Amino acid sequence: MTITIAQNTAHPLTVSRLGYGTMRLTGPDIWGEPANRPEALEILKTAVAAGVNFLDTADYYGEDVTNRLIAEALHPYPAGLVICTKVGATRKPDKSWVPFNTPENLRTSIDNNLRTLKQEQIQLVHLRLMGPGTVPLAEQLGAMFEMQKEGKIQHVGLSNVTRAELETGLQLGPIATVENMYSYGQRTTVQLPHSANPGGEEVLDLCEQHGIPLIPFFSLVHGLPNVGYKLAEIAQKHKATPAQLNIAWLLHKSPWLLPIPGTSSLAHLRENLKAADIRLSAEDMAYLG
């Protein structure tokens, strides 16, 4: 299963529909070095060797931890590997998440990502929105599109967006991808300690209409608790875990979904990758609802 990002542009990117999110490779609270650095490096190598060619990262993971791990494990990068990063936020020493989204901030972040990832151009960058009261969206996206013209960014995406924000973004310029929280058990907005996270269900139909891949994040963190018996029942039917069924449900929900389940465990990575082999019937999907 593959999906094409920016399919109607001069530089489309075709990737496997099961990617890998690197956030969990950091230390506790998404801060600091991994508890097991050799395993973290092996996870990246194993994922790519298994056919994963879409990695999601950000320079504020760690900070800079996941970018440096990616470069250490995989540079020089194999042909076809797409590394997607995010800008628009940063971390304070108290581990809080704060906006970093003025045009100057965004340029600083892009330059930092280029340096730590050892790249001359970033193939896909998500502008993560940090809620109302910050820099206007048009100003943020304007800075992103300017860096796209300069060649620092190939494609621009949006992350953590409401439907209204996505509609505005589409009027401002080409949006290649959207990255929102989405899973079987978490489909609409959820309030986290540092921000409200709009759900994937709120924008999925709009993404489908425009041929924009929707990249679900946190699908295993907030998607499994308290989802009821149906997911576990279908998982048992397919001799799979509920986590694997959650990934399989996303893959079957829409051909425009590109899940990026993350983990800091090599064993769990291998389990997650096997989810791509699960074939849910129309009856399974109807029963899951």
Image (cartoon, rainbow, N blue to C red):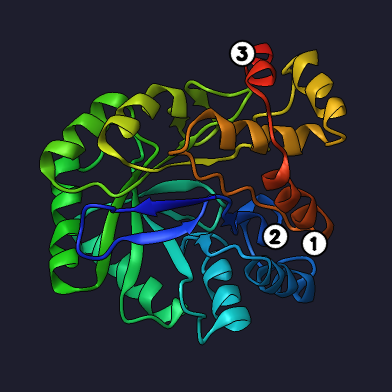
Observer able to see residue 199: no
x, y percent for residue 263:
71, 53
* Residue 168 image offset from top left, x and y in percent: 17, 33
Q: Which mark is residue 289?
A: 3
Amino acid residing under circle 3: Gly
The residue tagged with tag 2: helix, strand or loop? Answer: loop
Considering only vertical position in the picture, is 241 above or below 232? below
Above or below, 66 relative to 216: below
Q: Is residue 70 left or right of residue 164?
A: right
Quarter occupied by residue 247: top right
- Between 216 and 143, the residue placed more toward the observer is 216
Earlier residue among tags 1 and 2: 2
Of badges 1 and 2, the one in the foreground is 1
Foreground mark, 3 or 2, reads 3
Looking at the rendered structure, the kind of residue marked 1 is: Leu
Q: Judge left or right: residue 213 versus residue 193.
A: left
Q: Which residue is mark 1?
A: 266
Label located before the other in sequence (3 or 1): 1
Nearer to us in this view, 193 or 14: 14
Give the quadrant of the C terminus: top right
- Looking at the image, which is closer to me, 188 or 112? 188
Residue found 47% across the figure and 22% down from its top: 189
Left or right of 231 on screen, residue 140 = left
Residue beneath disc 2:
27
Could you tell which of marks 3 and 2 lies nearer the N-terminus?
A: 2
On screen, 145 above or below 77? above
Give the camera-side residue of 116 and 270. 270
Instruction: Name the residue type under label 2.
Output: Gly
The percent position of residue 277, horizontal first and vertical second, equals: 71, 46
Q: CA distance from mark 3 to mark 2?
A: 36 Å
* Residue 84, image x, y percentages: 43, 61
